[in-house]
Image (spheres, rainbow, N blue to C red):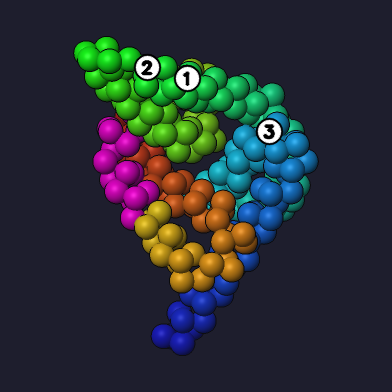
Amino acid sequence: MSLAWLSNGFYRACEWIMTLAYLNFLWAVFTLAGGIVFGLFPATIAMYGYIRMLLQKKSPPPLFSYFWKTWKQAFVRGNLLFAIFAGAGCIIGLNLLTMQQLEGPLHTISLVGTTIASILFVIAFVYIFPVYVHYDLSLKASIYVAVFLPFSHPLTLIISVAGFLAIALLFFILPPMLPFFAASCTAFVIMTGSMFAFRGVRTVNGS
């Protein structure tokens, strides 16, 4: 019995490793297919969507066909989302530049406001993809949920931070693995933490 369990566990681990490597490869290919700028968000949405299905223990469709279909479907909305984040990032960057010319209370107020905006920007960017693939929401609502997700469910943030540290340590020890697993492993960690929050919402809602 123990040997069978070990054999099955080893097989599942190898299956996950191969899937994450292939996901990372497709993410890179489809990002490049969109000229990087226009391919990044649709490819990332497709990657998160597939990982979500795996975590839900659903029988996923063939990976390439799913990725291609989802990439096309998410191309317009994904790039609108990219435009929103690019615009917000530019505004924060301009604030950082103009803030250097301010003095006294105005500098302090600008510093505090820009710092808060930067933190919320990073949080929204990290969790927007899990929210996008899990809920059928408008882009505005998706960003709102992404910002408040780790605050309403601290376990999500704890899992994400712990996962990031584990991944950083792994890549520090084995740097050749970085180009093969960086994107997919990061998405796996963030999606795993987010699923705990989504299950909590479903439990509270009684659905």
The residue carrying pointer 1 sits among few (fewer than 14), some (14 to 19) or many (20 or more) residues within 10 Å by Cα, namely few
Q: Which mark is residue 94?
A: 1
Amino acid marked by disc 3: Val
Start and end of the magenta stretch? 147-162
**Residue at the spot x=35%, y=40% of the render?**
197
Q: Earlier in the sequence, mark 3 or mark 1?
A: 3
User: Magenta stretch: dominant SS?
Assistant: helix
The residue where tag 3 is placed is: 37
**Residue at the spot x=60%, y=41% of the render?**
44
The answer to whether one can see residue 70 in this image is no
- Give the alpha-carbon distance from disc 3 to disc 1, as whole Å: 21 Å
The residue carrying pointer 2 sits among few (fewer than 14), some (14 to 19) or many (20 or more) residues within 10 Å by Cα, namely few
Which one is in front, 172 or 38? 172
- Residue 126 lies in what quarter of the image? top left
The residue carrying pointer 3 sits among few (fewer than 14), some (14 to 19) or many (20 or more) residues within 10 Å by Cα, namely few
Instruction: Locate the N terminus and report the quarter of the image it occupies.
Output: bottom left
Amino acid marked by disc 2: Gln
Q: Earlier in the sequence, mark 2 or mark 1?
A: 1
The label nearer to you, 2 versus 1, is 2
Asked whether 187 falls inside the magenta stretch, the response is no
Position of residue 60 measured from the top left corner of the image (x, y, whole percent): 63, 51
